[in-house]
Image: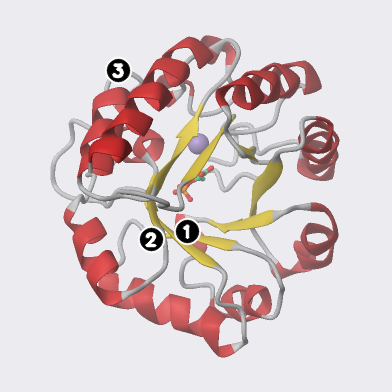
Amino acid sequence: MKNKKSFFIYGPCSIDTEANLEYIARNLKEMGVKYLRGGAFKPRTSPYTFKGLNYAGLKILKRVSKKYNLKSVSEILDVSYLKYFEENIDVIQLGARNMQNFTLLEEVGKLNKPIIIKRGFMSTIKELLYSIEYILQQGNDNIIICERGIRTFQQESRFSLDITSIFALKEKTNFPVIVDPSHSTGNANWIMNASFGVMAAGADGLMIETHQNPFVSLSDADQIISLEKLKKLHQKVIEIQKIL
Ligand code: PEP
Ligand code: MN
């Protein structure tokens, strides 16, 4: 597909050290990627796990993304962080758990910045579309939709990757639809093929978690892929886009 706008958003699940983020950013720059993700406020199911470096993490993300001329992407958990995100982060991510945080939706709708809205893992497409309308009503139409897997009865993957949502969302909206194969599979070994599948299905990009040393990642270590693997994946994905 010619002149297709695509969004490849890679980076650590959570920002841990500046050295790791630098390593990732340097590699992404070499790959020609434009976005660097990194969580600083992490919505963790268990409060006993690493919840991120908070503002210190966002400061690292800002420094590193500026240095490598990448656009920073990070998740906002609460309206109280809004001003800081507005001033310091390029693209604001609304996570699956906040897809129906209606106050937050309205507040990001007042900003003049791209918003990535992730589908709630218990949410229908109709509910996702209504959430997007909360943002639109406030004037912000700079929206990227992210499918990140839903909860079903099967237990083999962390979530079930709903590939049909790409078709439905692309029929019903004009917004870019990207897919997060990291959270939808929860399995580093499955991310490459899941990425090929969703790109062949028409996704406009990917959000993938990576780390200099995946095994030491402080969050989601099972689903983090190495930069070597990411490079291979990215190259092939670009090829898939070319033949579509
Ligand atoms: C994330 O991308 O870091 C994340 C927490 O994803 P989700 O909101 O899809 O669970
Ligand atoms: Mn994660």
Mark 3 and mark 1: Cα distance apart in space: 25 Å
Amino acid type for the residue under numbered disc 2? Gly
Give me the C-alpha separation between circle 2 and circle 1. Answer: 6 Å
Around disc 2, counting alpha carbons within 10 Å, would you say few (fewer than 14), some (14 to 19), or many (20 or more)? Answer: many
Callout 2 secondary element: loop
Q: Are marks 3 and 2 in contact (CB under 8 Å)?
A: no
| Residue 97 marker | 1
Q: State which quadrant residue 66 falls in.
A: top right
Taking 55 as reference, is 132 above or below it? below
Report whether 233 appears left or right of 31.
left
Indicate which label's residue lies in the foreground, 3 or 1. Answer: 3
- Residue contact at pointers 2 and 1, CB within 8 angstroms: yes
Q: Earlier in the sequence, mark 2 or mark 1?
A: 1
Counting from the top left corner in percent of width and height, residue 69 is at 76, 37
Q: Hey, which residue is sitting farthest bottom in the picture?
A: 137
* Sequence-wise first label, 3 or 2: 2
Amino acid type, callout 1: Arg
Q: Is residue 195 left or right of residue 28?
A: left
